[in-house]
Image: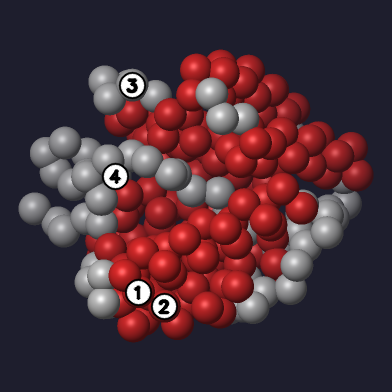
Amino acid sequence: MHKVARLTLTAFASAALASGGAVRASDNPAMDAQVNRIDNQWAHIKYQVRDANQQFSELQALAQQAAEVAARYPNKAEPLLWQGIVTSEEAADASMFRKMGFARAARAIFDRAKAINPKAGNGGVLMSLGVLYYRVPGFPIGFGDSKKAKAFLDAALALDPNGLDSNFFYGDFLNAQGDKNGAKAHLLRALKAPANPARPVWDAGRRAEARALLVHIQRRG
């Protein structure tokens, strides 16, 4: 059985969209605006909604909106990326019996995005797949695989070497693998990423997670 980083589907992935987490403009401003709305609402739900039942209810509504945007632009990877992000967040908040269903659905969505453009989101698609593979349980419960996770995370980090999300999740992965020094190095690099005024809720929330993980690692010695 493959070693996996976690045995629960908690705190699932967001994705770094272009350098520093900004949503990169495409040749379709209407699509960009819709993707931005999904992004901003996701950040609000994840970091500002505290009630678990309300959070899951709002995620379900947002998942429907994200699916509609993805269907509107079937040959674009970016809407699929955000549909997958919202679906993976549903997995984090769902009951134990439903987590794997959401996780498999998220993987299928990310795979579709990767088939269209593996570099979409400046590595966001690859990073999101990597996070799924290290946070989902391995066989026989799920599809988790630390080797696949590392390959995806390496590829994502190569595309966004100084990004907040890319380094945060690489640090989280290394910590789960027992490499505390490597984890700390990437978490510190994540915190050095330039602040992103276009996505303030995500930026503040992810930095808080990085600082909290650093404290946790340091307390463990």
| Secondary element at image label 2 | helix
Q: Is residue 73 above or below residue 119?
A: above
**Image side of residue 186 versus residue 151, left or right:** right
Marks 4, 1: nearer the viewer: 1
Residue 184 image label? 2
Look at the numbered discs 3 and 1 and tell me whether their residues touch, using CB distance below 8 Å.
no
Q: Label 3: which residue?
A: 95
Query: Neighbour class for label 2 at 10 Å: few (<14), some, many (≥20)?
Result: many
N-term mark: 3 or 2: 3
What is the spatial separation of the Cα atoms under label 4 and label 1, in whole angstroms? 25 Å
Of circles 2 and 4, the one toward us is 2
Mark pair 1, 2: CA separation: 9 Å
Q: Do tag 1 and tag 2 residues touch (Cβ < 8 Å)?
A: yes
- Where does label 4 land, which residue? 136
Name the amino acid, label 1.
Answer: Gln
Q: Nearer the viewer, mark 3 or mark 4?
A: 3
**First of labels 3, 4 by sequence position:** 3
How busy is the neighbourhood of tag 3: few (under 14 within 10 Å), some, or many (20 plus)? few
* Proximity of marks 4 and 1: CB atoms separated by less than 8 Å: no
Where residue 82 appears, x then y in whole percent?
A: 63, 40
- Residue named by callout 1: 218
Q: Amino acid at mark 2?
A: Lys
Q: Position of residue 220 (x, y in %)?
A: 26, 70
